[in-house]
């Protein structure tokens, strides 16, 4: 698909930059999170990092997001986002972590950020976000998972 071919290189570069940030600034997975990551088949789960943020960066300039929001346009505002071995989590959205760890497993299974992003973009553009196979798998494999973070139990 021509649109994917045009978008993918910039999105992949952005994702690689964000992964580097998360790996530098993020925290490692806790014991229960590591166990779940292992059950998903994530190799070297001890290398996965999670960075909690007030706002998850998007691969478009912030002023465009602000402009769209100011005009009342719906803006993709995820509670979490996996980028290779890095996971952004929005403060207060800790329940998104199991879902994002499924995406981390998908990145590994597919061979990294480039292959994952091309497939993910194609699926979202042709099937919609909710219908994308990678999203359906993440919802299915993370459903009903509980874990503790900052002394609180979260479940999906």
Image: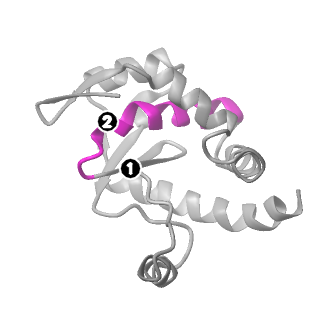
Q: Is residue 28 above or below residue 67?
A: above
Q: Is residue 108 above or below residue 120?
A: above
Label 1: element kind? loop
Q: Residues within 10 Å of mark 1 (few under 14, many from 20)?
A: some
Residue that extends furthest to the front in the rendered view of this protein: 72
Magenta-highlighted residues? 91-110
Q: How many marks?
A: 2
Give the residue pinned by disc 1: 79
Closest to the observer, 87 or 92: 92
Label 2: element kind? helix
Give the residue pinned by disc 2: 95
Q: Percent from the top left, x then y, of residue 29?
A: 31, 33
Q: Residues within 10 Å of mark 2 (few under 14, many from 20)?
A: many
The answer to whether residue 106 is magenta is yes
- Residue at figure coordinates x 44%, y 59% from the top left: 77
The answer to whether residue 31 is magenta is no
């Amino acid at each position: 698909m021509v649109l994917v071919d045009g978008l993918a290189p910039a999105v992949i570069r952005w994702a690689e930059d964000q992964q580097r940030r998360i790996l530098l600034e993020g925290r490692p997975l806790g014991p229960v999170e590591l166990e779940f990551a292992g059950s998903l088949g994530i190799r070297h789960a001890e290398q996965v990092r999670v960075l909690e943020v007030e706002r998850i960066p998007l691969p478009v300039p912030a002023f465009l997001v602000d402009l769209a929001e100011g005009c009342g346009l719906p803006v993709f505002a995820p509670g979490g986002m996996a980028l290779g071995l890095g996971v952004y989590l929005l403060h207060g959205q800790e329940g998104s972590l199991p879902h994002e760890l499924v995406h981390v497993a998908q990145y590994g299974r597919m061979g990294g950020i480039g292959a994952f992003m091309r497939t993910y973009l194609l699926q979202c553009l042709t099937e919609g976000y909710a219908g994308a196979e990678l999203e359906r798998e993440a919802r299915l494999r993370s459903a009903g998972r509980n874990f503790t973070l900052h002394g609180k139990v979260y479940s999906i």
